[in-house]
Image (spheres, rainbow, N blue to C red):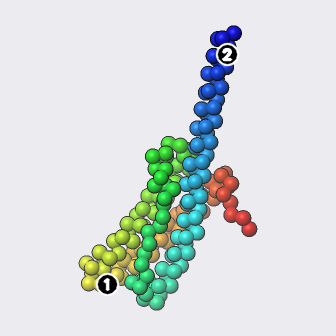
Amino acid sequence: MEVYAAIAAGLFGLFMFLITKYLERQSVTKALLAEIQRLMVVIPEHLGHWKKWMDKGETQKHPLIPFSCDVYAKHIENLGLVDRKYVGSIVKFYGYLKFVNSLQEAQAKERELNENNSESFKYEYNASLERLVKDFGNAFNNAFKDYGLLKKG
């Protein structure tokens, strides 16, 4: 009888471990997707502002604030928990976003090197934002649906 109790306890422990890992995987993936969903609202809006500033010649009047990736930064060591179906796209997205943030940081140096002329930066930055929106604008729609993150309304 004790053997059966030990086997039952072991199976229950294994079952609980698997359920916990599954829930953890779901939570990490959903958190990253929610952050991407937020960014895919903010980035196109920023691109719209950037284009207006370019048209008015006002890009130097507006500071560039890096796009926040706090959830990704916190869970980078947990990428093994991310749904395998989406992990590649998530990593590509954040890699490209890191590039855009690096461009923002380089804006002041660009001006300094080009005697306060930021023409090349303006167009490079604009093209990078457009590429990010084009490449990832709808890339996560299925993932948002799978994880219950579709926009209401």
Q: Quadrant of residue 102?
A: bottom left
Give the residue number, with chain letter if any, for mark 2. Answer: 5
Give the x, y percent position of residue 80.
50, 42
Give the x, y percent position of residue 145.
67, 55
Residue toward you, 118 or 153: 153
Q: Is residue 61 above or below residue 96?
A: below
Give the residue number, with chain letter if any, for mark 1. Answer: 117
Q: Is residue 44 above or below residue 119?
A: above
Q: Amino acid at mark 1?
A: Asn
At mark 1, the secondary structure is: loop
Residue at 49% x, 45% y is 78
Q: Quadrant of residue 152?
A: bottom right
At mark 2, the secondary structure is: helix
Q: CA distance from mark 2 to mark 1?
A: 77 Å
Residue at 48% x, 80% y is 50
Q: Is residue 89 left or right of residue 10?
A: left
Q: Quadrant of residue 123?
A: bottom left
Of mark 2 and mark 1, the one earlier in the sequence is: 2
Residue at 69% x, 9% y is 1
Q: Residue furthest right?
A: 153
Q: Is residue 18 above or below residue 44?
A: above
Q: Residue furthest bottom?
A: 56
| Quarter in which the C terminus is drawn | bottom right
Q: How would you rate the neighbour count of disc 1 (Cα within 10 Å): few for under 14, some for 14-19, many for 20 or more?
A: few
Q: Could you tell me if residue 95 is visible in this image?
A: yes
Q: How would you rate the neighbour count of disc 2 (Cα within 10 Å): few for under 14, some for 14-19, many for 20 or more?
A: few
Give the x, y percent position of residue 40.
56, 66
- Which mark is in front, 2 or 1? 2
